[in-house]
Amino acid sequence: MRLFVAIDIPVDVKDNLRALLDRWKPLAKLNWSPVDNLHITTKFIGEWSEPRLDQMKTALAEISPPGPIDIEIRSLGWFPNPRYPRVFWAGIEAGEPLHNLARATEQASAKLGVPVEERPYSPHLTLARIRTPVPLYSLREAVSAHESQSFGRFRASAFHLYLSAGGRYTRLKEFSLGPAIS
């Protein structure tokens, strides 16, 4: 079973992104992500044995809740760079609280033997993947008018352990981020 840890995106923010992507999909033949699958990953775990699932749930439940996290979906970009893109993304602005949660999920899973990610944490929503080079002129032109647009703000009060199977994501467990800190 393939697992990951993530924060869900609320429906109203997904609706904002869906409206925009529905206009852009005809502009480039990319492997577009289903909007309903969009989430903010804090840790990709990868293959995990089902008999050890409860261990992972317990490890994640032991993370000290940092309190709700204010998140804004803002800006658009390309990984690894605009010249030779492989991924089209929307940016996540949440500051140190989200980075702390990602670090905590990294540490909790590492204690169980999950490899530590070497790259710095870079929160984003993968809007599309580019498997083979395709013309992007029309899409780039459309994107340029929205590069710094906000697609919505929300306060996350929980994170989740997910199963990924056949392009479908199933929530296995919810973990509270705790009460708001005054």
Image: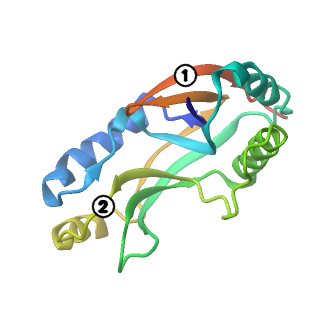
Mark found first going from the N terminus, 1 or 2: 2
Rendered residue at 25%/70% (across/down): 140
The residue sitting at the left extreme is 26
109 in relation to 55, above or below: below
- Amino acid type of the residue that numbered disc 2 sits on in the rendered structure: Arg
Residue 11 occupies quadrant: top left
For marks 1 and 2, give the one nearer the viewer: 2
x 72%, y 50%: residue: 115
- Residue lying at 20% horizontally and 45% vertically, measured from the top left: 22
Read off the residue under disc 1: 171
Q: Position of residue 66 (x, y in %)?
A: 81, 37
Q: Is residue 164 left or right of residue 97?
A: left
Which of the 4 image quadrants contains residue 54?
top right
Residue 140 lies, with reference to residue 75, above or below; the image says below
Q: Quadrant of the N terminus?
A: top right
| Disc 1, SS | strand
Residue 40: image x %, image y %?
Answer: 55, 43
Q: Is residue 158 left or right of residue 87?
A: right
Residue 13: percent from left, percent from top: 42, 38
Other-residue count near label 1 (Cα within 10 Å), few / some / many at <14 / 14–19 / ≥20: some
Q: Secondary structure at mark 2?
A: loop
Residue nearest the observer in this picture, 35 or 143:
35
Q: Which residue is mark 2?
A: 131
- Which numbered tag is attached to residue 28? none
Quarter of the image that includes the C terminus = top right
The answer to which of 163 and 70 lies nearer the viewer is 163
Say if mark 1 contacts mark 2, CB within 8 Å. no
The residue that appears at 19% across and 68% down in the rendered structure is 134
